[in-house]
Amino acid sequence: MTGPQTVISRANFDALLFDLDGVVTRTAAVHAAAWKRLFDEYLEARANRTGESFRPFDSESDYRRYVDGKPRYDGVQSFLASRGITLPYGTPGDDPQQETICGLGNKKNAYFRDHVQQQGVEVFPSSVTLIQKAKEQGFKVAVVSSSRNCAAVLEAAGLQDFFDARVDGVEIARLRLNGKPAPDMFLEAARRLGVEPGRAVVFEDAVSGVQAGRNGGFGLVVGVARAGQAEALRQNGAAVVVSDLQEIDLAAAGPERSPPHLASALDHVEEITRRMEGGRLAVFLDYDGTLTPIVDRPERAVMAEEMRATVGRLAELCTVAVVSGRDRADVTRFVGLDSVVYAGSHGFDIAGPGGLQLQHQDAAQFEPALRQAEEELRRRLSGIDGAIVEGKRYAVAVHYRLVGESDVLQVREAVDAVASHHPELRQTGGKKIYELRPALDWDKGRAVLWLLRALDLDAPDVLSVFIGDDLTDEDAFMALYDRGIGILVAAEPRPTRARYVLRDPGQVRIFLERLIDALERSAG
């Protein structure tokens, strides 16, 4: 190891959420040993009683697949189901000798606590160092563990005062949260820290944990592969995989700034247009909030004729693409210009002049899950005034702009619950909107880069400009950060990777007119 390979910037994120076992403390092996002792004893006694063959619990494959990262009773039930064994659930107060799900879970807990009391708890020094540095740099930190022993383990390790919030197995039961791979625990931790999921980083070593981070729409999910599970973590939602947290570094500053510190694109048109002299221009535009004002209902976001005329004139002089979270058919109908490229569903569905066509090759397989999720959301939200469920081909959106403040939490809980039932979908958000999308590594930034290649614009002489207002546009700002210009549309401060700012769609139209003037001068 030559040094940290992944840098997490305080400008991009506000909080770090850590799983406990296997990420901060060396207790994963203790848990695995306790599970093996429990199940081997039970399976052997059952085999002797029933004449079934005895097949012991595998501390590697069975542990990772059925119990790692899950609440204790869920782990018991999951493993026994894999062996075709059904037991009464029982109650959390069951004696460890009772042959129930809870009884076996309580026996496993006794084995684990005995080990902790007799031998103490080891920590990963690099993890403790990272947490200390995070607190020094202003990050909020939380521990998120399915274990009911979380508090005892933290105390045994001397870490009880390290975290700003703790969501553990005790809180799962008290708040009736769904366990991992549902995102409930991480979302509750983010709520307690007062941060948006998109501004928080999840650190997990279990497949169920990275699935939970992905399902919750967190800004970054880091998989910690200490036991050779790197590929499984990647496949299930980890955007970054490390073998130890010494590979992570923290930065107090990064490429994000807030609008008061961004220059107005209108005041720097000459500076921007100078960058395209002697070359070509490609302009990418979000729709809602950029070409039209944000409205209460999505069907009312009709583009003004003046804006349509401006975009049409610009499309005659350079490549123009509208990249929207809306369905491609909808945004095509709203804009109504044949000369424009349309990328709908955050870039999953692209079409344009000259037969240009792209649909993400894996997206279609998610349509049944999206339709099921849409139906579930309509049913759950039918009694909440103002809640709008918008079914799209490659997404389901829930708009809550018209929902009363007292009902917003109920909307979020409904979306969380549906997301937990569909781990193949990931939950994201935007301005007064929750959204479920295919859990694929695809976003507006990747769509823009694909378009540049498809249109032969991936070249040094091309200046790419992306103008957008939504959190989903940040992926495009980042994709173009070192090769183009991002322009945020915002009247109020917001951390962003954009380089310039415009106040509203009215200023967007003026800026586009200035680009047209510059292009016409260079052509003349």
Image (cartoon, rainbow, N blue to C red):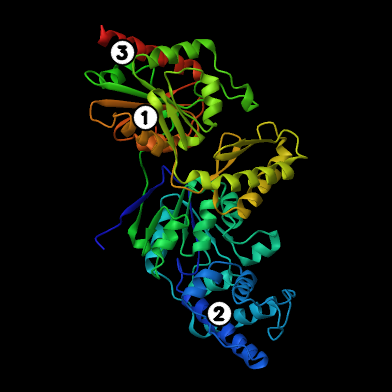
Question: Which residue in the structure is indicated by mark 3?
Answer: 519
Question: Which residue in the structure is indicated by mark 1?
Answer: 499
Which is more foreground, mark 1 or mark 3?
3
Sequence-wise first label, 1 or 3:
1
- Name the residue type under label 2: Trp
Question: Which residue in the structure is indicated by mark 2?
Answer: 35
The residue tagged with tag 1: helix, strand or loop? loop
Q: Residue furthest right?
A: 383
| Quadrant in which the N terminus appears | bottom left
Badge 3: few (under 14), some or many (20 or more) residues near its Cα, within 10 Å? some
Left/right of residue 278 with respect to residue 401 in the rendered view: left
Sequence-wise first label, 2 or 3:
2
Q: What is the spatial separation of the Cα atoms under label 2 and label 3, in whole angstroms? A: 69 Å
Q: Residue furthest top?
A: 524
Badge 2: few (under 14), some or many (20 or more) residues near its Cα, within 10 Å? many
Which is more foreground, mark 2 or mark 1?
2
| Count of numbered labels shown in the rendering | 3
Of 55 and 190, which appears nearest the observer?
55
Cβ–Cβ under 8 Å for marks 2 and 3: no
Percent x, y of residue 111: 58, 83
* Rendering quarter of residue 231: bottom left
- Name the residue type under label 3: Leu
Badge 1: few (under 14), some or many (20 or more) residues near its Cα, within 10 Å? many
